[in-house]
Image (tube, rainbow, N blue to C red):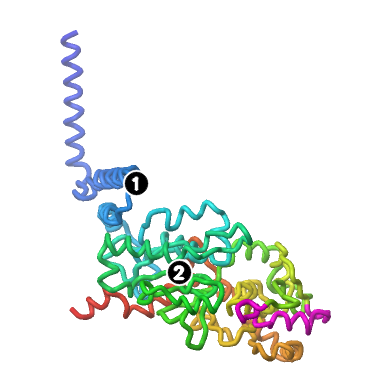
Amino acid sequence: MVELHRSTKNRKGFYVRMKFFRTRNSKPEKPFCFRYFKWLLWFSLSFYFFAKFLNNHEPSTNSLKKTIISHTQSNVVSRALSESVPQQPRINQGLLKDLKVYVYELPSKYNSDWLSNKRCNNHLFASEVAIHKALMKSDVRTFDPSEADFFFVPVYVSCNFSTVNGFPAIGHARALLSSAVELISSELPFWKRSNGSDHVFVASHDYGACFHAMEDRAMADGIPDFMKNSIILQTFGVKYKHPCQDVENIVIPPYISPEDVQSTLSKSPIEGRRDIFVFFRGKMEVHPKNVSGRYYSKRVRTEILRKYGNDRRFYLKRHRFAGYQSEIVRSVFCLCPLGWAPWSPRLVESVALGCVPVIIADGIRLPYETTVPWSEISLTVREKDVAKLGAVLDKVAATNLSAIQRNLWDPQLRRALLFHDDMEIGDATWEVLVELSMKLGRSYRRSRLSSE
């Protein structure tokens, strides 16, 4: 038994020696980095997932500093891995001037807690949610605030729906935003160093950052002082001086679900038959009420109903209908009159579904005017001329309607007005970034680089 054991040991020793000999003599030795790359990769991935585990299981805290430290540790590993693998060019290089945005990871009470109500994701003010989601997954996002050009403050203030009428109640907006600013300014230095001028908020309400649905109250309250140096992404915009846009701002479209639009178009192609000449569905008061000296829609909708309510060419409906997009896609002209505020979700729905928007809101500023050729895809009728609406539309139908529709049906325009959870080149969040890239003079990081 002893001799057999020795023999086995000898064979093993011979095998090892032979294997070593073959390695040295049969094939050239591979480079050191290549031979040990898999061990480096294994160690890096193990460290990354271990750090991720600790981050996800640490005690709940409001500390923004800990979030930055955690991401910095993860980024060291991520960069080591990315340098060892060929990378595709980032889409924002050149196109967006290598723009970088830091997204504050605020406590959930400021944003994600509100998502317990499903309406928060898809009502007309939901751009505040959609932009946040898109930025979180976008390659313009940086986890290193020292690299950031802009700082996005994700606070959802439109998801507090009234139990009386179901509309968003935004009376809490100022306090919630003020609390968020107090948190980020007390824990991190980036707000104070620029006085908030490179910080970005969303205010997708009737009168933007004035946070009130009634214009007189909105104007009286004005924009909160702590937001006046920042950049506001807002649906409200007019071409004349107004206290609710007396701030650096970008006019964005109201939120319309891209999935709903796609579902409608899958059933009725955009170039299909349009058997409705003029369409409008929405609030039209027969006897408008005087509310603090103001009338809803400045009585424009009432005049439309009075003048054209019995005109068979005008498909006018005063009550809600869940499938109203199926009516838009069948229509040639879609009326977009003002309500309390000048803007309307009908503008986006009309463009997305190929119906020529007829804008009746004097002095309105439209979303992304540098990108979307509004004058080539829509009509504008002055509020005082609403009684002449029929004649105006008849003339367009007889002359240049085909040219307008050809421009309108360009899929790039539809994309530019719709927000997606995963940002696409040319979509509504992308257009926000394009607009921000034109405001890099406000970037604290860029101003320091240019002065060095």
- From the viewer's perspective, is residue 282 above or below residue 115? below
Q: Is residue 16 left or right of residue 57?
A: left
Residue 77 in view (yes/no): no
Q: Is residue 345 left or right of residue 311?
A: left
The residue closer to the viewer here, 42 or 292, is 292
Q: Residues within 10 Å of mark 1 (few under 14, many from 20)?
A: few
Q: Residues within 10 Å of mark 2 (few under 14, many from 20)?
A: many
Which residue is under mark 1? 60
* Badge 2 element: strand
Q: Is residue 297 magenta?
A: yes
Percent across and percent down for residue 33 are 21, 50
Percent across and percent down for residue 431 are 47, 74
Residue 189 in view (yes/no): yes
Q: Is residue 406 left or right of residue 95?
A: right
Quarter the C terminus occupies: bottom left
- From the viewer's perspective, is residue 30 above or below residue 446? above
Quarter the N terminus occupies: top left
Percent across and percent down for residue 125 are 54, 66
- From the viewer's perspective, is residue 347 above or below residue 387? above
- The disc at residue 202 is 2
Give the residue displayed 71% in from the left and 78% down from the top: 288
The residue closer to the viewer here, 256 or 80, is 256
Numbered range of the magenta stretch? 290-314
The residue closer to the viewer here, 34 or 201, is 201
Q: Residue furthest toward the top?
A: 1
Give the amino acid type for the residue marked by disc 1 in the picture.
Ser
* Badge 1 element: loop
Q: Is residue 348 left or right of residue 15?
A: right
